[in-house]
């Protein structure tokens, strides 16, 4: 047990300072996508809705309804439409109000 | 008028009860009449016994003119027998209250009640016997009556087996008892007990010791000393509940009475070693008795083993008393006699109670197997409370009576250092240690003995549907009251027992033991003191404190009651409870040298490891060591001898005439010499 | 052999048709030589019973599948000959309502009591007998209920621990609390959609299950995956093995009460998980495997830079543990599984290898693994043997990752994806997950959607060895140690 | 009790020490692994005054993972009922928030179909950092951010176009 003690001392502290300070390891976490409304046309939005495996996306008229809670950050939408979808880098998503997780992204109307 | 007159009245009642039972117990009214007579006899016996305690020894009364074997019916009431007589009376009364509801009127019941009341009568005769011949005849009558009593259901093989065990060991013991009496009687030239006691000092030490050892073994068969105990667990389960209660409450105690008679009254052996032998016989009996009790799941067998344990405790106290006598510590001699006899009374009450409640359980559920019971406290609340009182008593937990007498015995044993011999002192402390182990195991055993049948969930449908309606309550309740009285009234009891001890030993403990303020100073003035009465009052008050605190301080705000946290399981099932056998498994593992358990696990698909769909069958059997390694060889040996002498019995009349002739010739020749 | 019409599918898989009356004889023929790796039914025009046999012999590794169309919905009791099939017989009853012809009692595996759940075929006529729960132990033993809500941070699982107070007489598990009906859910999904659920069947072997399912779909459509993508899958799989073995080490320390060791192992575990996130963008490697290839290339430089340090933590922790006698004493001779038991029960992975069975799906030719892949082995069959096997495998994983990243034969490990044609077909896929061989079987309809998918994670196999391992012991407190050394998930069993 | 009152009570009563019981209602074992890592040296939730407790009787917070399998709902409810009030339920991971399994014969699909959820933590799985943030939010120690996040690119000017 003494050996373990010395080993522990030699190993040093690895504990994160989060939440007092940000943690660097957060940078490589998968995060929910953010959308670029300029590039988000109606067909693109429909394609994204079709490809989302977790049902986080739904188009309601000219709005893409995005449920961050249901999003698994699988990255399929970003792979499908890299010009319209990018990573948000946000991981602090906890909320006490479920409705705040539902975002409405405006969809660019095509000229008819 | 002497206490004997009350005993005559009791005897008359019991004789009448036997006759009524025989003739009329086929009807409910006859059954009740028989029990009423039996109960009246019990009242008379209890009163007579209590009176005899204070009265001292009466003179020997010769009654009847029979001169069959050179003696008349000699009767005497003594202080020592008084305790046992009073116990006999109390047991008889409670059984009389119990029996009318327990038995249904029938021919079998009639015979049973006749045998039972004859057994009561014979027990009374043993206790009132003033002469050797009377004693022996009464003793033998008692054995035969008890044999019939155990054979309530003669067609049942196990009943026949249990009764046979009882009879065989009784007869073996009887022979030794006869021999012991013959030695003392021939050496003192007297056949009355008083006469033998008066001339005992003239008997050589060797003869006294021989007589004592013969008596110890002979009465040990009845008292259930290991290894002479094997009849108890066989006979108790097969007898009716009140019969078992009577066997454990009284008949076993008569064995103890016999030992006390030889150890303290007739011709106490000289020297330290008879005391040591007695003490260790008792201590080992106690330890082995409780260990075997732990391996039983049949309630009555469990209680029978517990009886063995308690007999062991009493005999240990007697043995230690004899040691102190040899060491000249007269006060301790008398004190341990008192403590032992106190335990006799206590055990007689709570063991009878527990057997009666076992009968209630068996009647309402149809089984004695603890692992088929459970949750009876909800179905049989009155019985459960009564049984709980008995359990507290037998587990020697304060404030009940078992605690008082066991505590006194321990206090006596702790005085071992006053014997003057280091070796003896160490041996006495060793015996105290064995008794300590026994006491701890007894608590464990009775937590199990009460918890498994009465607490938890019912394990079978009959247990779930048991009903208390129509079940006897009064008899056991009377005994529960007696238990409480023996605890709270300890100073009174000790005052009476002090009278008894003075009659037997001539030593007066009086003010030393009882300073007069409900306190008891056991064993020695500068050792310890306590008051069972105050203890009981204090414990009740102490238990009330948390209740009062709860009532006073419970939150006024609304609280929520939710079920027990169960890990989210669908529902608890009875099979998820500790069972009697699993509860005692740690003991089984710790003492496996004694138990030599054989474990077998079988599943139907053992050859098919993935197909383990079948039910598991698990069994752990305790080896019956004494039956297998002591009695079985003995029985084989006897059978072999019987085979040897079989040619003598040819069936030829001429040959038999020759035998008669040879015997007469031999008698003449011996006479001529 | 009474087989008809052999036909082959891509990979080292041979298929035979076996007529229903001959099934018993064929099983009798195959059982001594091959390992019954899986058994399942499919509902088509007639219910078809498929038995997947694995050949573990070095150099001949591969799979044999026997197909038996069932007449009148009965089949010979396979488990009477090959005991490993018993759990599957129970599953087939729950999913299709058909049971072995012998009418033997079947246990409850996935079906919750009194549940009205959709099934793959007919509903079972009656509830499963739950035979193992009806103990007639005669009061000499009782059931110690444990769960389903157990310690903190573990999955829901019910242990019925039958004990005599001291000995473990029997132990059985209920896992139906976690049955999510995955095989039912996969019906009608495209392989791409199915992968999403397959990874979440048993998240701790997401790569292995994803690979197995993707490989099955690729086999069904005859798709060839780019070699670089295959190597990327292998890198991910070995990273998965590494972090799982680190997690198992932490769990072993926790179960033996060695908190310092647990912390050391958890430092290694966290560093390996961060490596995963750096290399593939997900701590548990979800989403790496795609149908027809991989969705992303690994950050090879990141792996080369971080892996030695992370594995160094792992190695330091494991070496310190191997020098701690109080720890090893708890492991030695605990939870012993004999070779015979492991073989009869068809166990896989480190558990089987620690009991002397050299089974490893990585040995099947056709994948990115070469012949020189070392298969760790031990014979003692106890917890210590499983621990040492895991350590040896971790070392081999590090070597393999380096090999794949610097592969001479191709472009190393990279992204690459082949389009799956939308055709019908059937295929078997496999991968060696950290817990052992994971199997997937896929039947695709004409539109390329799944009509029947069978997922068999290693956990579904190895739990059946758990009670035997526990019963070899008479000490309750060893059970958590045994559970940690198996390192299984309930999710994989109750999928 | 309204949500605001509950939060006040919690901030007052659990400001410094909070005991957590986890509940798996059908997860894939990965959320459990991340929860276990909370007590690992890298995250060490005890430094923040959070503790795990196996007994729901001692727990203040129920950390629920998985899509709430119907067969498990009774056990989940029992666990919740066994906790003394005031109590917090945290739905953890995409499964618990309805992202993986729909409402069908096998699963309820979301935890709030059975238990009254107070805090939602998205993520598949939520990383230990996300869990720490969620616990902080649950006791009112950390601010909620997601309310103000539009998840449109304007909000993330530091990110380059097309970066993923």
Image (cartoon, coloured by chain):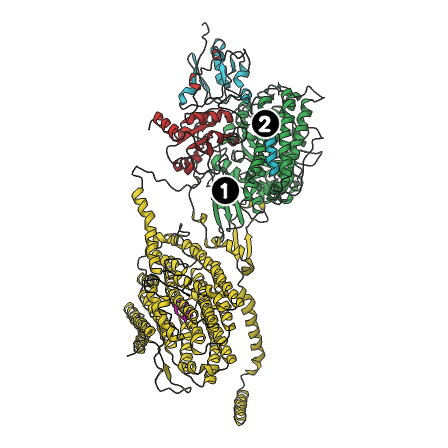
Q: Which of the two residues, B338 or B620, is positioned nearer the viewer here?
A: B338
Q: Could you say where residue B565 lies in the image, as x and y percent from the top left?
A: 41, 41
Residue on which disc 2 sits:
C271
Q: Which mark is residue B111?
A: none
Q: Could you say where residue C404 lies in the image, as x and y percent from the top left?
A: 67, 24
Residue on which disc 1 sits:
C159
Chain ID for label 2? C
Chain ID for label 1? C
Which lettered chain is shown in red? Answer: D
Which lettered chain is shown in cyan? Answer: A
- Residue neighbourhood size for the residue with mark 1, other residues' Cα within 10 Å, grouped as few (<14), some (14–19), many (≥20): some
Confirm whether the magenta stretch covers residue B251: yes
Confirm whether the magenta stretch covers residue C170: no
- Do the residues at discs 1 and 2 belong to one chain? yes
Which lettered chain is shown in green? Answer: C
Judging from the image, what secondary structure is the residue with disc 2 in?
helix
Which lettered chain is shown in yellow? Answer: B
Residue at 60%, 30% (x, y): give it.
A11
Which span of residues is magenta-colored? B246-253
């Amino acid at each position: 047990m003494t050996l373990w003690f010395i080993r522990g001392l030699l190993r040093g502290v690895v504990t994160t300072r989060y939440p007092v300070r940000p943690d660097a390891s957060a940078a490589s976490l998968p995060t929910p996508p953010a959308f670029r409304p300029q590039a988000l046309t109606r067909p693109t939005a429909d394609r994204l809705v079709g490809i989302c495996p977790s049902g986080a996306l739904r188009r309601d008229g000219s709005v893409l309804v995005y449920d961050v809670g249901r999003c698994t950050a699988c990255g399929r939408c970003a792979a499908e439409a890299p010009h319209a979808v990018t990573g948000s880098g946000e991981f602090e998503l906890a909320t006490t109000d479920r409705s705040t997780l539902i975002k409405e992204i405006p969809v660019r109307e095509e000229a008819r | 008028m002497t206490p004997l007159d009350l005993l005559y009245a009791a005897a008359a009642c019991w004789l009448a009860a036997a006759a009524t039972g025989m003739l009329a117990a086929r009807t409910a009214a006859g059954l009740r009449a028989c029990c009423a007579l039996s109960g009246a006899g019990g009242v008379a016996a209890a009163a007579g016994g209590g009176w005899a305690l204070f009265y001292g020894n009466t003179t020997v009364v010769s009654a009847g003119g029979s001169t069959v074997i050179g003696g008349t019916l000699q009767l005497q009431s003594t202080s020592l027998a008084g305790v046992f007589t009073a116990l006999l009376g109390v047991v008889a009364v409670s059984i009389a209250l119990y029996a009318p509801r327990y038995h249904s009127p029938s021919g079998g019941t009639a015979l049973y009640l006749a045998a039972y009341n004859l057994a009561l009568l014979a027990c009374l005769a043993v206790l009132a016997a003033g002469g050797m011949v009377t004693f022996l005849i009464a003793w033998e009558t008692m054995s035969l009556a008890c044999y019939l009593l155990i054979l309530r259901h003669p067609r049942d093989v196990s009943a026949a087996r249990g009764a046979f065990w009882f009879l065989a060991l009784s007869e073996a013991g009887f022979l030794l008892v006869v021999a012991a009496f013959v030695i003392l009687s021939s050496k003192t030239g007297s056949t009355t007990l008083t006469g033998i006691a008066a001339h005992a000092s003239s008997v050589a030490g060797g003869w006294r010791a021989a007589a004592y050892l013969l008596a110890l073994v002979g009465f040990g068969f009845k008292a259930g000393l290991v290894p002479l105990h094997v009849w108890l667990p066989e006979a108790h389960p097969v007898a009716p509940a009140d019969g078992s209660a009577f066997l454990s409450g009284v008949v076993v105690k008569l064995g103890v009475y016999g030992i006390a008679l030889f150890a303290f009254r007739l011709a106490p052996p000289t020297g330290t070693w008879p005391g040591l032998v007695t003490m260790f016989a008792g201590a080992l009996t106690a330890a082995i008795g409780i260990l075997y009790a732990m391996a039983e799941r049949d309630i009555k067998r469990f209680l029978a083993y517990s009886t063995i344990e308690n007999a062991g405790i009493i005999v240990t106290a007697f043995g230690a008393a004899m040691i102190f006598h040899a060491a000249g510590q007269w006060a301790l001699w008398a004190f341990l006699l008192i403590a032992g006899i106190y335990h006799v009374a206590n055990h007689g009450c709570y063991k009878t109670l527990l057997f009666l409640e076992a009968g209630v359980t068996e009647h309402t559920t149809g089984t004695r197997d603890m692992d088929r019971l459970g949750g009876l406290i909800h179905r049989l609340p009155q019985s459960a409370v009564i049984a709980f009182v008995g359990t507290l008593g037998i587990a020697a937990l304060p404030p009940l009576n078992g605690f008082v007498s066991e505590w006194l015995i321990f206090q006596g044993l702790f005085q071992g250092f006053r014997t003057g011999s280091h070796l003896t002192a160490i041996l006495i402390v060793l015996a105290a240690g064995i008794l300590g182990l026994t006491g701890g195991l007894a608590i464990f055993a009775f937590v199990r003995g009460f918890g498994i049948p009465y607490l938890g969930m019912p394990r079978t449908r009959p247990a779930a549907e048991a009903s208390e309606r129509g079940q006897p309550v009064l008899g056991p309740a009377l005994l529960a009251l007696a238990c409480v009285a023996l605890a709270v009234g300890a100073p009174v009891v000790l005052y009476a027992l002090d009278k008894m001890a003075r009659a037997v030993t001539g030593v007066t403990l009086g003010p030393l033991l009882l300073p007069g303020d409900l306190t008891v100073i056991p064993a020695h003035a500068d050792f310890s003191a306590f008051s069972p009465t105050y203890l009981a009052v204090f414990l009740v008050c102490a238990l009330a404190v948390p209740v009062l605190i709860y009532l006073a301080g419970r939150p006024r705000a609304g609280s929520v009651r939710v079920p027990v946290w169960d890990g989210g399981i669908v529902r608890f099932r009875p099979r998820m409870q500790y069972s009697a056998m699993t509860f005692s498994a740690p003991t089984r593992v710790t003492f496996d040298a004694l138990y030599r358990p054989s474990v077998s696990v079988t599943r139907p698909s053992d050859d098919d490891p993935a197909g383990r769909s079948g039910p598991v069958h698990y069994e752990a059997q305790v080896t019956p060591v004494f039956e297998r390694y002591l009695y079985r060889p003995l029985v084989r040996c006897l059978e072999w001898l019987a085979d040897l002498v079989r040619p003598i019995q040819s069936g030829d009349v001429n040959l038999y005439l020759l035998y008669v002739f040879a015997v007469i010739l031999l008698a003449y020749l011996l006479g001529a010499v | 052999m009474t087989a008809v019409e052999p036909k082959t599918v891509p990979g080292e898989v041979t298929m035979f048709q076996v007529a229903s009356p001959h099934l018993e004889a064929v099983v009798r023929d195959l059982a001594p030589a091959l390992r019954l790796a899986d058994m399942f039914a499919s509902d088509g025009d007639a219910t078809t019973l498929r038995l997947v046999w694995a050949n573990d012999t070095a150099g001949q590794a591969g799979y044999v599948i026997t197909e038996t169309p069932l007449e009148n919905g009965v089949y010979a009791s396979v488990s009477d000959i090959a005991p490993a099939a018993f759990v599957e017989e129970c599953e087939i009853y729950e999913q299709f309502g058909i049971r072995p012809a012998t009418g033997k009692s079947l246990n409850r595996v996935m079906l919750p009591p009194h549940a009205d759940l959709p099934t793959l075929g007919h509903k079972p006529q009656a509830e499963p007998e739950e035979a193992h729960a009806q103990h007639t132990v005669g009061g000499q033993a009782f059931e110690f209920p444990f769960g389903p809500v157990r310690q903190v941070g573990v999955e829901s699982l019910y242990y019925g621990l039958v004990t005599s107070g001291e000995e473990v007489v029997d132990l059985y598990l209920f896992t139906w609390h976690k049955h999510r009906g995955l095989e039912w859910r996969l019906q009608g999904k495209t392989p791409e959609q199915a992968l999403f659920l397959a990874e979440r069947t048993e998240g701790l072997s997401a790569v292995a299950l994803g690979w197995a399912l993707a490989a099955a779909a690729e086999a069904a459509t005859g798709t060839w995956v780019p070699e670089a993508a295959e190597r990327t899958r292998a890198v991910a799989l070995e990273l998965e093995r590494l972090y799982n073995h680190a997690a198992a080490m932490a769990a072993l320390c926790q179960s033996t009460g060695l908190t310092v060791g647990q912390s050391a192992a958890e430092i290694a575990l966290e560093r390996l998980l961060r490596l995963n996130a750096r290399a593939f963008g997900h701590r548990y490697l979800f989403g790496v495997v795609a149908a027809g290839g991989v969705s992303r290339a690994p950050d090879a430089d990141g792996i080369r830079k971080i892996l030695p340090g992370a594995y160094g933590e792992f190695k330091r922790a494991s070496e310190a543990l191997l020098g701690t006698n109080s720890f090893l004493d708890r492991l030695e001779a605990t939870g012993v599984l004999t070779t015979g038991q492991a073989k009869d029960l068809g166990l896989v992975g480190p558990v089987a290898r620690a009991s002397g069975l050299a089974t490893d799906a990585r040995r099947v030719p056709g994948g990115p693994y070469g012949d020189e892949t070392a298969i760790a082995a031990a014979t003692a069959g106890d917890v210590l043997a499983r621990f040492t096997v895991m350590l040896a495998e971790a070392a081999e994983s590090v070597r393999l990752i380096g090999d794949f990243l610097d592969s001479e034969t191709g472009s190393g490990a990279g992204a690459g994806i082949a389009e799956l044609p939308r055709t019908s077909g059937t295929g078997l896929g496999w991968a060696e997950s950290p817990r052992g061989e994971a199997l997937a079987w896929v039947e695709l309809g004409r539109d390329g959607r799944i009509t029947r998918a069978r997922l068999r994670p290693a956990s579904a196999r190895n739990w059946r060895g758990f009670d035997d391992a526990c019963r070899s012991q008479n000490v309750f407190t060893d059970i958590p140690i045994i559970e940690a050394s198996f390192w299984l998930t309930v999710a994989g069993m109750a999928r | 009790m309204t949500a605001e009152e509950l939060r006040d009570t919690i901030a007052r009563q659990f400001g410094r020490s909070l005991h957590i019981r986890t509940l798996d209602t059908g997860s894939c074992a990965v959320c459990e692994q991340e929860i276990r890592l909370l007590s690992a040296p890298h995250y060490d939730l005890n430094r923040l005054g959070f503790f795990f407790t196996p007994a729901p009787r001692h727990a203040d917070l129920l950390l629920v993972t998985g899509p709430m399998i119907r067969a498990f709902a009774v056990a989940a409810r029992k666990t919740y009922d066994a906790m003394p009030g005031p109590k917090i339920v945290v739905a953890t991971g995409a499964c618990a928030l309805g992202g993986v399994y729909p409402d069908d014969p096998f699963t309820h699909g979301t935890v709030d179909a059975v238990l009254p959820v107070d805090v939602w933590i998205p993520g598949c799985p939520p990383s230990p950092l996300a869990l720490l943030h969620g616990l902080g939010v649950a006791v009112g120690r950390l601010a909620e951010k997601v309310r103000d996040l539009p998840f449109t690119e304007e909000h993330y000017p530091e990110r380059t176009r097309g970066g993923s």
